[in-house]
Amino acid sequence: MKNNVFALQLDKVTRLTAEWCGPCGSYGPVFDEVSSLDIDTPEGEEFAKKFGIKGIPTTVVERNRSIPQIVSGLITKEHLLSLLEK
């Protein structure tokens, strides 16, 4: 189940992923509890360039036009939630 409380506080939470990426698949269930905007790297090339993303999975938290938080690699649910609370 998605937590809609965060949708009120955030502009966007995005995860860059790829079908062939093992860690991306492991992170999927954690991410899906919080958000639903996944961008597969071939389709998300412009998005990745915009934020200088070079590795996947990467999570981007954009909040109210402030500087986005960008975290590369597999993260835990607790880490993701802590990003959303900042």
Image (spheres, helix red, strand yellow):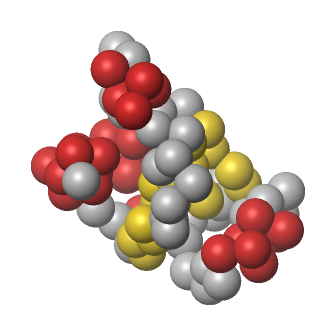
Image quadrant where one finds the N terminus: top left
The residue located at (51%, 47%) in the rendering is 64
**Residue drawn at (38%, 17%), measured in percent from left and top?**
4
Image coords of residue 25 (percent x, y) = 47, 51
Q: Looking at the image, which is closer to me, 48 or 40?
A: 48
Q: For residue 76, say whether it is visible.
A: no
Find residue 20 and report its horizontal and vertical position in percent. 63, 63
Q: Can you name the residue that lies furthest to the front here? A: 65
Residue 14's place in the image compared with 59, above or below, is above
Where, by quadrant of the figure, is residue 10 drawn?
top left
Q: Between 11 and 22, which is closer to the camera in this rendering?
A: 11
Residue at 57% x, 54% y: name it. 65
Whether residue 78 appears in this view of the structure is yes
Give residue 85's quadrant in the image. Answer: top left
The number of numbered badges drawn on the structure is 0
Q: Position of residue 7 (x, y in %)?
A: 45, 26
Please give the name of the residue rendered at 61% of the width and 38% of the height, measured from the top-left corner.
37
Above or below, 75 against 8 in this view is below
Q: Please, which residue is most extreme toward the left here? A: 78
